[in-house]
Image: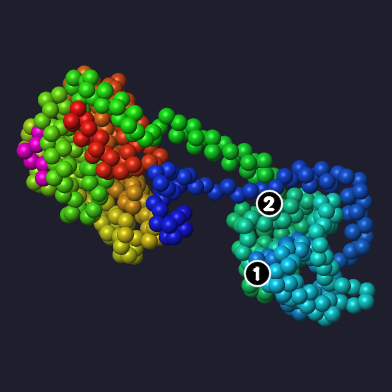
């Protein structure tokens, strides 16, 4: 999500998470892959595997065995592991001649010079440690520079008292999952790098920073001296996660999510193509009494600072022409002030809701009536204090005060930091509203957080419009919007038995019937209806 924003300049959506690309909304999800634990369970039942386990236990009788399985790659941190083991023997001399590391290094990119140098470095470390702490009868490190078949690997996992993974950068690292799957009886301890993806899911492992050799050395000592009840508890938790989040569960979850997204988009968010536009025009022509409800900022004009969103002559001429039609009622919904709307649209026979639904002017009237407002405005003071507090530590964010709502705007903030701060602010506001039992709503939109009186949503405004007129008067409704705050409006329009068309500007997850790719296309559609 961050890369899409910073490197490609794409727009992202926090909920549902996704990225907009060329008119398409691509859902982004987190789906950590797993293994098939049944494969290892079946392998353990094989007689020759049990025989091999017995042989290994006899071979390493009286010793603590640590297993390491890594591809010989820079990201796997094998030199870090060996350096930590060397320090372990220095700091804890009582473990000398009593601990064995079986390190399997699977060859990788053997023709690349950098990997040849890595191989040499590992060989030197293994030789130095075996020379310093080994003898003719004992080698602390058994190093295998080769692949190992599943049966042998399962036997090695099973007899090990600990598994150590010291990746300095990794994806998931499923070796950790495989080790857990083989430790249901012995309950060995998993030492896992915090830089492996699995560290976020296998939280009962001992997590270490592989760059801190002292921490890793201490973790080895802790793992080897851990009481059985604690090991058993950790293994139980780890295996529960590994068994529930298997490879098949991952596949099922991933495919089900793709199917769900496909089904949720079927019949919705259809582009207003030329064929769709013809159908809308035909319905508009056939209707005797029409209602057009349209949002202003982001739908008819590019959303800018509150003081600079004056309508273009084209938009004003369009709304004027639509409102003159005796068979059409036009309503404009805006966060702008009553004075601002009167200045730019005064004299037009259209209705308008101003200041985020706080005031309404009915078609043919120049009077503004207060609606959905609380008798006591003291709630704004506390809300503003909280919003200003967060704005002071969020460069680029600011608080907008309107007659009927308060908005925390973070459009100019670093996207990741802005979303993070907004989530904390939303929680803080929710706690305040609940504690004081205030009749307020907290709404999250695109780069803004809004607090408004309950009943002031755009769905409520649509109900007010239909209540003002005789509902049976209309036989066609067109509703246009551009953001998450307009979703209630779409839902309310579709609840009526009146034939309707709902459109959202931009292709995003929406309850609207159709989408228009840009503001320009929204204006074009209205102009086509006007000329028809």
Q: Is residue 435 visible?
A: no
Residue at 33% across / 52% down in the picture? 447
Q: Position of residue 92 (x, y in %)?
A: 77, 76
Instruction: Judge whether residue 346 is colored magenta.
Output: yes
First of labels 2, 1 by sequence position:
1
Q: Where is residue 414 in the image (x, y as percent from the top left)?
A: 38, 61
Give the Cα separation between the discs numbered 2 and 1: 21 Å
The quarter of the image holding the C terminus is top left
Query: Which residue is more in the foreground, 329 or 116?
Result: 116
Question: Dot 1 surroundings within 10 Å: few (below 14), some, or many (20 or more)?
Answer: many
In screen coordinates, is 390 left or right of 195?
A: left
Could you say which disc has been placed on residue 238 in the image? 2
Residue at 29% across / 34% down in the picture? 489
Q: Where is residue 128 in the image (x, y as percent from the top left)?
A: 80, 79
Could you say which disc has been placed on residue 210 in the image? 1
Q: Indicate the quadrant where residue 342 lies.
A: top left
In magenta, the rendered stretch is: 344-349
User: Of the residues tagged 2 and 1, which is closer to the observer?
Assistant: 1
Residue at 64% across / 55% down in the picture? 172
Q: Position of residue 191 (x, y in %)?
A: 70, 62
Q: Is residue 6 visible?
A: yes
Residue at 84% across / 80% down in the picture? 131
In screen coordinates, is 242 left or right of 136?
A: left
Q: Indicate the quadrant where residue 387 lies.
A: bottom left
Could you say which disc has been placed on residue 200 in the image? none
């Amino acid at each position: 999500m961050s890369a899409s924003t910073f490197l490609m300049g794409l727009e992202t959506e926090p909920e549902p998470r996704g990225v907009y690309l060329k008119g398409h909304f691509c859902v982004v999800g987190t789906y950590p892959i797993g293994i098939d634990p049944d494969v290892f369970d079946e392998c353990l039942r094989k007689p020759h595997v049990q025989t091999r386990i017995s042989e290994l236990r006899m071979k390493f009788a009286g010793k603590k065995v640590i297993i390491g399985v890594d591809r010989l790659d820079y990201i796997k941190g094998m030199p870090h592991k060996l350096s930590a083991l060397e320090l372990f023997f220095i700091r804890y001399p009582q473990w000398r001649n009593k601990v064995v590391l079986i390190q399997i290094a699977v060859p990788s990119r053997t023709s690349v010079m950098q990997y040849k140098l890595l191989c040499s470095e590992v060989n030197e470390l293994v030789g130095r440690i075996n020379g310093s702490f080994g003898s003719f009868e004992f080698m602390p490190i058994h190093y295998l520079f080769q692949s190992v078949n599943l049966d042998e690997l399962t036997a090695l996992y099973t007899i090990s008292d600990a598994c150590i993974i010291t990746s300095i950068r990794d994806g998931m690292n499923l070796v950790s999952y495989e080790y857990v799957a083989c430790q249901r009886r012995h309950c060995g301890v998993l030492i896992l790098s915090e830089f492996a993806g699995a560290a976020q899911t296998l939280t009962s492992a001992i997590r270490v920073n592989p760059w801190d050799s002292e921490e890793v050395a201490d973790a080895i000592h802790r793992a080897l001296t851990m009481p059985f009840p604690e090991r058993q508890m950790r293994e139980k938790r780890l295996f529960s996660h590994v068994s529930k989040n298997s490879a098949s569960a991952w596949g099922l979850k991933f495919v089900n999510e793709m199917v769900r997204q496909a089904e949720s988009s079927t019949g919705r968010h259809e582009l207003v193509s030329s064929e769709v536009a013809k159908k809308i025009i035909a319905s508009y022509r056939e209707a005797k009494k029409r209602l057009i409800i349209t949002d202003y900022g982001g739908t008819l004009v590019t959303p800018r600072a509150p003081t600079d969103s004056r309508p273009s002559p084209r938009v004003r001429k369009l709304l004027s022409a639509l409102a003159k039609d005796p068979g059409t009622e036009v309503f404009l919904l805006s966060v702008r002030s009553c004075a601002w709307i009167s200045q730019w649209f005064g004299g037009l026979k259209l209705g308008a809701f101003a200041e985020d639904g706080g005031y309404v002017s009915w078609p043919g009237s120049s009077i503004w009536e207060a609606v959905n407002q609380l008798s006591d405005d003291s709630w704004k003071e506390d809300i503003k204090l909280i919003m200003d507090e967060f704005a002071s530590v969020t460069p680029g964010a600011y608080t907008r005060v309107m007659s009927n709502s308060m908005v925390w705007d973070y459009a100019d903030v670093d996207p990741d930091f802005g979303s993070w701060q907004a989530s904390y602010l939303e929680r803080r506001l929710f706690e305040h509203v609940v504690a004081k039992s205030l009749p307020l709503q907290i709404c999250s939109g695109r780069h803004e957080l809004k607090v408004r009186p309950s009943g002031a949503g755009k769905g409520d405004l649509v109900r007010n419009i239909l209540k003002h007129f005789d509902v049976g008067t209309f036989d066609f409704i067109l509703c246009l919007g551009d953001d998450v705050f307009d979703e209630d409006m779409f839902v309310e329009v579709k609840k009526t038995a009146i034939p309707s068309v709902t459109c959202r500007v931009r292709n995003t997850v929406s309850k609207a019937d159709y989408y228009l790719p840009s503001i320009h296309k929204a204006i074009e559609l209205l102009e086509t209806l006007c000329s028809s």
